[in-house]
Image: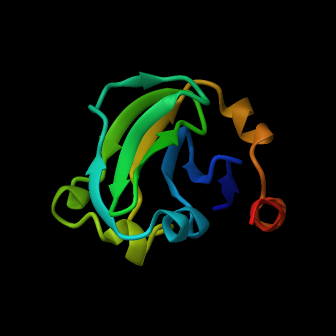
Amino acid sequence: MMKKYAKTHEWVQVEGKVATVGISNFAQDKLGDVVYVDLPQVGKVVKKGETLMSIESVKAASDVYAPVSGKVLQVNEKLNDQPELVNKDPEGEGWLVKIEMTNPNELNELLDEGAYKKHCEEEE
């Protein structure tokens, strides 16, 4: 299973038509300590590039953008009680939502890990 990244620092891991979405390690590092994760409603329909939800840290609130279009199938309920999972394991247990993709071709527009790392270095 391959991970792809958006320039807005979300990652996607795909299984069939379902994309698990979270924020990258780079993003959580920039955010600082996460204190609240405003999860979207299950059933919410999103378009690629639109605001999916927001995450609040001690520093600021930050929008999370949908890296693919589709419908929110599941949200990571654990984050309601343990928002710090986003800091501890952003690309694992700290995942945010699962989206049923309506246009898997959009994955081609995302970056692979190497290209994403380069993007982060340029942003620093």
The answer to which of 1 and 66 lies nearer the viewer is 66
Residue 93 in view here: no
Is residue 66 found left or right of 52 in the rendered image? right
Query: What x and y, as percent, mark residue 112?
Result: 78, 58
Residue, far front: 59
Q: Residue furthest bottom?
A: 88
State the image coordinates of residue 26 (x, y, percent, origin top left).
60, 67
Residue 72 image-quadrant placement = top left
Q: Residue at x 22, y 53 (%)?
A: 77
35 vs 102: above or below:
below
Residue 103 visible in the snapshot: yes
Q: Residue at x 39, y 61 (%)?
A: 59
Residue 62, placed above or below residue 35: above
The residue depicted at 46 percent of the width and 67 percent of the height is 90
Report the side of 12 relative to 42 (left or right). right
- What is the x, y in percent for residue 5? 68, 53
Quadrant into which the N terminus falls: bottom right
Rendered location of residue 101, percent (x, y): 55, 31
Question: Is the C terminus in the top left, top right, bottom left or bottom right quadrant?
Answer: bottom right
Q: How many marks?
A: 0
Depth check, front residue: 1 or 77:
77
Q: Which residue lies most toward the left here?
A: 81
